[in-house]
Image (cartoon, helix red, strand yellow):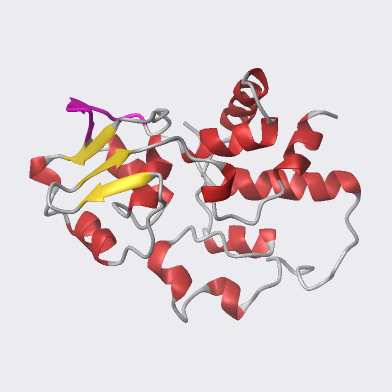
Amino acid sequence: MARYTNSICRICRREGEKLFLKGNRCFSEKCAFDRRSYPPGQHGQRKPRLSNYGIQLREKQKVKRTYGLLEKQFKNLFKKAVRMKGVTGENLMMLLESRLDSVLYRSGFAISRNQARQLINHGHFSLNGKKVDIASHQIKPGDVISVKERSKNLVPIQAAIESVREVPEWLKVDSAKVSVEVLTAPTRDTIKMTVQEQLIVEFFSR
């Protein structure tokens, strides 16, 4: 499967804002975006004027890269959002937040979505008591995700739990059992991201 192998920090610099892709490093003085907030490359410090298409593209790329999806995955998720009732842009954001890797990141069991995907692929979590190793699995209200007994003392998981900053109100974390319950589906109001999802809808509607 294709994957991004270049510097993660280049992505934040290219999109012009912190996407918090490297966990605690993004909050430290080592953050590359804080030191060089302009796009990478020899022409990075230029400020070109973007067309409407360019603005829409950048918004789509920002969201896609924040959640670590490939282009085909993102497009398929958008098609699913279109078929759902309600506002397409808000549906898209809800589907992105409801991915298993995103839920684990939001609950504080991983310092980044990339780390969450790796832990899921290695089989360190169970969903409603059953093994789960698919990071894109859509989580529903009432689902309970638990860290397997043999994995509770893993350094990455313990470090993530100790550094957790804020858990969304639609999730309930049980520190004793090292598990998280999904209380309700995420809404746009609970997704604290500076995203203009309507621009993504306009991009795919061209």
Magenta-drawn stretch contains 130: yes
Against 174, is 162 above or below? below
Can you tell which quarter of the image residue 164 is in? bottom left
Which residue is at 52% across, 58% downward?
8
Can you tell which quarter of the image residue 121 is in? top left
Magenta-drawn stretch contains 23: no
Q: Position of residue 90 (x, y in %)?
A: 63, 37
Which residue is at 68% across, 66% downward?
40
Which residue is at 53% across, 54% downward?
6
Q: Position of residue 31 (x, y in %)?
A: 50, 74
Can you tell which quarter of the image residue 60 is in? top right
| Residue positioned most to the left | 150
Left or right of residue 25: residue 174: left
Q: Can residue 101 be seen?
A: yes
Left or right of residue 31: residue 71: right
The magenta stretch is 126-134
Left or right of residue 195: residue 3: left
